[in-house]
Amino acid sequence: MAGNTNTLSKEEELKKRSHMALLRSLLPIIGLVVVFIVFNILTKGRMVQKLSMAMSQVYVTMIAATGVFFIMTMGGLDFSQGSILGMASIVVCMVSKTSIPLAIIAGIGTGAAIGAINGFFYVNRKIKSFIVTICTMFLFRGIIKYLTSNAPVQGSAKLIMLNTDRIKLICMLVVVVLGLFAFQYTRFGICLKAIGAGEKAAKFAGIHTDRMKFLVYVLAGAITGFAAFINSIKVGSVTASGGNQVETQILIALVLGGMPISGGAKSRFVSVIIGSALYVVLSSGLNMVGLSTQAQQLIQGVVFLVFVAVFADRESLRVIK
């Protein structure tokens, strides 16, 4: 009898866990629908009318979030994404006066170079990822302010001509589809999840963890460098605040999408898509309601904490690498 009771209790526990896992996976989608409906009611239908305008803000966030998603999957963090975006945007604007294709390559190269700096100190000098990226964030934020101290860095007039939803949507889809394919259907995604779940075990499995971690930071920087091109054609110039707070927006978007802070096997690429859309809808809705900046930050902070509490994997939670 005792054995049967234990078996039943284990089955009930497994069912309970599976139901909770299903609820957690559906929560970001439910949140997106609920937030959209609530703000559409509060704004008396203006949310639907201005949906295309709200979604125009999602391109840069979703592209840059793709690279950070890879970093977070292997258990790291990157707080330098805003500075990478700002620096790459400056380079794109400068080089665009010579050639647009060359400007895109230069932006990607700039992002990759800063990502390589992050990767070098993280992998070779064994400094925690959040410490390294906070340092590079301040370093390149200072360079951005220096380069834009006299006047904004203007881009070529041809950049503004490329500012169409079609071009930005195509660029975003290319990055997202390639990122999804690489994560879901190649060894790349398996290695990232293995490192996030346990680096020592990943090494025993034959994964070159140090090389993979370095390359992921370079890749994330390159992706954000490409996002800088989208940012540049949208704005046409870069000021001292270029890329400011982007790293926070990306982190919030990924967590809202259901990304576990600890990374690992529970990471899902859909977090990039749902999270970016949810963050943009939330921010746009708070703006349309007419709340002050402080009130918006307060509400975003509360929502962020709730989602962190829900999606934190307490069984594998540890200090971020």
Image (tube, rainbow, N blue to C red):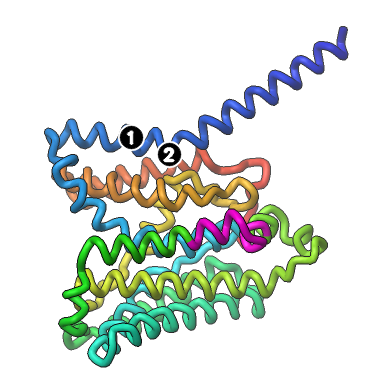
**Which residue is depicted at the point 35% across and 87% down?**
102
User: Secondary structure of the magenta portion, mostly?
Assistant: helix
Q: Amino acid at mark 2?
A: Pro
Give yes or no for residue 228 being in the magenta stretch: no
Could you tell whether 77 is left or right of 201 in the image? left
Q: Nearer the viewer, residue 294 or 20?
A: 20
Q: Which residues are magenta?
A: 178-190
Find residue 167 and report its horizontal and vertical position in percent: 27, 66
Q: Secondary structure at mark 1?
A: helix
Q: Which residue is mark 2?
A: 28
Q: Quadrant of residue 250?
A: bottom left
Q: Quadrant of residue 321?
A: bottom right
Q: Secondary structure at mark 2?
A: helix
Give whichever of discs 1 and 2 has the lower sequence position.
Answer: 2
Could you tell whether 117 is left or right of 40 in the image? right
Q: Which mark is residue 33?
A: 1
**In which quadrant of the rendered image does the N terminus lie?**
top right
Q: Please identify the residue farthest to the bottom as the structure is shown.
A: 98
**Which residue is depicted at the point 60% across and 80% down?**
120
Q: Nearer the viewer, residue 150 or 71?
A: 71
